[in-house]
Amino acid sequence: MRDLEKIAALALFVAIAGAARGQTPGIDVRVVDRQGTPVADAVVVAVPADPNVRLPARLAHGNVVDQIDKQFVPRVQVVEVGTAVTFPNNDHVRHQVYSFSPARRFELPLYAGVPAKPILFDKPGIVVLGCNIHDWMIGYIYVSESPYFAKTRADGTAVLANLPPRAYVVRVWHPQMSVAEETTHKTVDVIPGPHANAAWTLELKPETGIRRAPAPGQGRGY
């Protein structure tokens, strides 16, 4: 009987060890506001603490910022430096998308459908999007210098997965946060096995983009 117990215990140990080895290293993230409410659309970026580490390129595909119901969708898009983004217009009115942000200045002439060419984002930084026709439309493209990034879901969580084991400086950004992104830095050690954890509590400012769209049935073609 004791031999059977030993065999069972050994099998359990091997199974647990194997599961730990099979779990890809990463960081589980949670972001809430001062009231403890989950914060969606927070961008989380991890950069190796060692500046000599060479970062791999992230495969970029299907990066789109759509225009639906006179809003940018998604409101916050995250891409790596060197990524091209397409701006289709799926509204029944035309839009004129632009940005004056230093990270990428551009303007798409008034259009419907899909522009002929995507926009290349070749510098890191935050790009604020607007529409010259509908001034309540505000969107954001976060251009990351690192391929290790994620965006929080409605429950305030995100996962930075498949990280090579090492120390990382991790930071968070949200369009409404009241502090500079640089003040959010945390050093997180990623090792093989269970994910590391990182959490932030942000103080958020009131949203600046106030929708002033015409009421239903009014202002058609606007």
Image (spheres, helix red, strand yellow):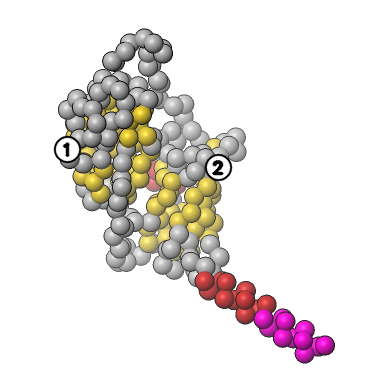
Please give the range of residues in magenta: 1-11
- The label nearer to you, 2 versus 1, is 1
Q: Is residue 152 above or below residue 140?
A: below
Badge 1 amino acid: Ala
Neighbor class of circle 2 (other Cα within 10 Å; few <14, some 14-19, many 20+) is few
The residue positioned 37% from the left and 17% from the top of the image is 213
Q: Name the residue under label 2.
A: 155
Q: In which quarter of the image is residue 216?
A: top left
Horizontal arrangement in the rendering, residue 104 relative to residue 198 (left or right): left
Q: In which quarter of the image is residue 104?
A: top left
The residue positioned 39% from the left and 46% from the top of the image is 182
**Residue projecting furthest to the bottom:** 3
The residue positioned 60% from the left and 35% from the top of the image is 35
Q: Which is the main secondary structure of the residues drawn in magenta?
A: helix
The circle drawn on residue 116 is 1
Q: Position of residue 45 (x, y in %)?
A: 40, 51
Q: Where is residue 65 in the image (x, y as percent from the top left)?
A: 32, 37
Is residue 21 visible to us here?
Answer: yes
Q: Where is residue 148 in the image (x, y as percent from the top left)?
A: 38, 56
Q: Is residue 137 above or below residue 159?
A: above
Q: Is residue 42 magenta?
A: no
**Depth order, front residue of 19/56:** 19
Sequence-first tag of 2 and 1: 1
Q: Circle 1 sits in a helix, a strand or a loop, which is it?
A: loop
